Amino acid sequence: MSIIPIFISGLLISLQFFTAPIHAITGNKAAETRQKSVKAKSDTTKTEQKEIYSNKESMLHISKEKDSWFFLIPDSLLQRPILTVTRFTATPAGIGTYGGEEIANQVVYFELSPDKSRLFLKSNVLYNHADSLDAIDKAVHNTSQDPIITAFKVEKKIKNAYRINVTHFLLAENCFSVPQRYKLAFHATNPVEGASYVERVHSYPINTEIRTVRTYNCSGQVPAARIAGTVSVGLNTSFVLLPKVPMRARIFDPRVGYFTDDYYAFSDDQQRVKLKRFVTRYRLEPKDEDIEKMKRGELVEPKKPIVYYIDPATPKKWRPYLIEGVKDWNKAFEKAGFKNAITAKEWPENDTTMSLEDARFSVIRYLASDIPNAYGPQVHDPRSGEIIESHVGWYHNVMSLVHDWYMIQASNVDPQARTMKFTDELMGQLIRFVSSHEIGHTLGLRHNFGSSSTVPVEKLRYKTWVKEHGHTPSIMDYARFNYVAQPEDNMAQSDLFPRVNDYDCWAIEWGYKPVFEATDSESDRYFMDKITTRRLAENPRLWWGDGEGYGLDPRCQTEDLGDDAVLASEYGIKNLKGIIGKLPEWTYWGDDSNGSNLTEMYSQLFNQFRRYCGHVRRYLSGTYYNKKTVNEAGNKFTMTPRAKEKSVLPFFDRHIFNEPTWLTNPSYIQRIYKSPAETYSILTGIMSPLVSDATLSSLNANYPIEEYLPELQGMLFKELGNQGNVSKYRRELQRVYVYSLSKFFNGNKTGLGTDATAYVLHSLQELQKKLQTATHQSGIDTITKAHYTQLADEINRTLTVR
């Protein structure tokens, strides 16, 4: 049965090849687009029909004569930086990449050859830069030769423009075709001769759009390749003219989380080269007549608001929620002095002058994918960081991800979460929050994984406090839902969700509020530095905790809440215990006769439990990292407080070292596993980082190894002290402990070793003695004796010199 739809899909690809129209359009209005037929002589003096589409406002003019394409490049375009963005417009099923996704971008420019016979298309590699008035600019130029992508013969000069034949270029395998990494991914090789074509070329006042279909031989396992031995993909490359004068860059401050770009700046006055690092942001400016109003503190509308369009492939019922997720950022832009700064609209499907691939438009692209994800990229001017556009990738199956998050984290307090299919309103609100998060990335913002750590855990249970402040100061954190709240707290559903909040408003204010007193980037930096220092001192909720660039700060974690991982996790586990027994009832839906929903959600619940344990474990050997300028007092690095490090093992003793039977043996466990013991490997995996090489090597003075290991060993081997039998579950944990210490010692015993190596040796020797003694004790069962004998033998093998 599966052959039929695959065959039809392949048939449609073939039909597209034979019937797709080939045409060129220029101009920015349908009414301005018209066909002109004229007679002209070709190089062979034969009179032929030309199809010319032109408009005086076009960035460049395009013509087509039979199978040849020509561009007319005006003088004014030479040396102008042009941003190119290449995207898939259509892809074969099964390659994991989708129509609308960006695959390459770079800046290029046209340059006339010295003899004026050719036009070079060059890549603008911005690595070094100097002011053209400085003498060192000559040296920078001599060491910054831009590569030539291709050279075009100048067919003729028409007034102040150069006519070039671009036929070969449009379909050549170059930096505007499918990148090699994608070809390797789906095993595409060389192009199929005659099976690629130009679909259309559109030119507008500041951009030109080139759309092609490429066909490759393919030996991969994607359906099209298995049937036909080839794959066809659609591509669109946008050539967008960048501003003559770059936007003023805002210099990056490591205390506020923005994406950045950089280059090395040279000047005659330097004694060392400086890396200029600046943030990416949209060009948001007040209208000239509103500048004085803005200075007085009045909200003004920007010259050009930020607009996102919703892909018409998006199911209609979800479009309003995506739009609201975009508009939610207006409250943040008001802090920067702008009203109505950002909006979203449905795509005008009847407007033939607009294209979803046109790089002038930012679009939330809806991708028919089983991947449970969404992402928010942006394309910017490398000279200044000005964001030109963004195409958010919205995978259809992201709904399964937010469903599972919400059901596991919130169903104990929200009855609407107790089903496998949410109401459209609930799912819409989940879509809205993800939309806001991804739009934040497109505005330039990075994740703020430390934001949630600024909130006292107990406050998350106070309904009025959460309603006013939200459960996390930033929607750019990975703090999903308020899993701390308990049923008796009567929390409103909206207060379980993250929202655009204090940090987000501050970050947008920092990045987008004009500094009218500044004259250049450096003076702008001077003013912003003072503002940032003051604001962060006034409000701890504005802290940016990276978590990606520096991964040792336990405050900067994903999927966590609050300032106390132990307390927050205790509340989270309490909610999981309230959920686990109800899963058979809550997961039954529709045609799920095999109970796959129950299996999936039990797995999700187990994963959530693992996250809670992981949040606590990160306190061990952690280091707080607070970014500071030279004018701010205090250390950048401080050890995690001793009390927090010491809280780790008691937490694990409560929830891991003693079998959590509520988790391993619910009433339905044998509908999922043969026995509860099959879950033990998951739990030992949660414990094993406590004795990993990384942990043992990095324990700090707050909780040194000579204090940590005896306490851990005492909890894991408490039966040695009370002469009790060891359960199957705890035997698994004890094996992991001994094997991990043995592995650590074997890997570090050469040379002089370290304090950690020495103490691990001491611990193994002491444990070996206790195990050997225990094997001769009466009152313990045979399997416990055999277990002790095995562990003692393993230690002996480790300590024996070979």
Image (cartoon, rainbow, N blue to C red):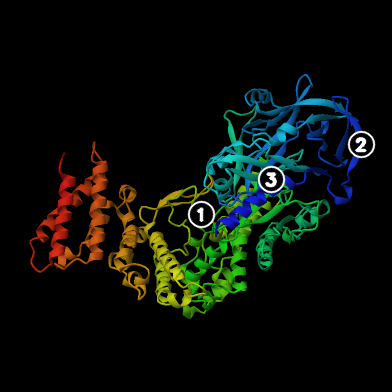
Residue occupying the far top of the picture: 115
Q: Residues within 10 Å of mark 2 (few under 14, many from 20)?
A: few
Can you tell which mark lies on residue 545? 1
Q: Is residue 714 left or right of residue 299?
A: left
Image location (x, y in percent) of residue 334: 70, 60
Of mark 2 and mark 1, the one earlier in the sequence is: 2
Q: Amino acid at mark 3?
A: Glu
In the foreground, 2 or 568: 2
Q: Amino acid at mark 1?
A: Gly
The reply to whether callout 3 and callout 1 are in contact (CB within 8 Å) is: no
Dot 2: element: strand
Q: Which residue is mark 3?
A: 386
> Residues under labels 2 and 1: Cα distance?
65 Å
Dot 1: element: loop
Q: Amino acid at mark 2?
A: Val
Of mark 2 and mark 3, the one earlier in the sequence is: 2
The reply to whether callout 2 and callout 1 are in contact (CB within 8 Å) is: no
Dot 3: element: loop
Image location (x, y in percent) of residue 125: 64, 32
Q: Marks 3 and 1: which is nearer the front?
A: 3
Q: Which residue is mark 2?
A: 38
> Residues under labels 3 and 1: Cα distance?
24 Å
Image location (x, y in percent) of residue 313: 68, 59
In the foreground, 187 or 527: 187
- Report which quarter residue 344 is drawn in: bottom right
> Residues under labels 2 and 3: Cα distance?
43 Å
Image location (x, y in percent) of residue 634: 47, 50
Image point (80%, 43%), residue name = 23
Q: Quadrant of the C terminus?
A: top left
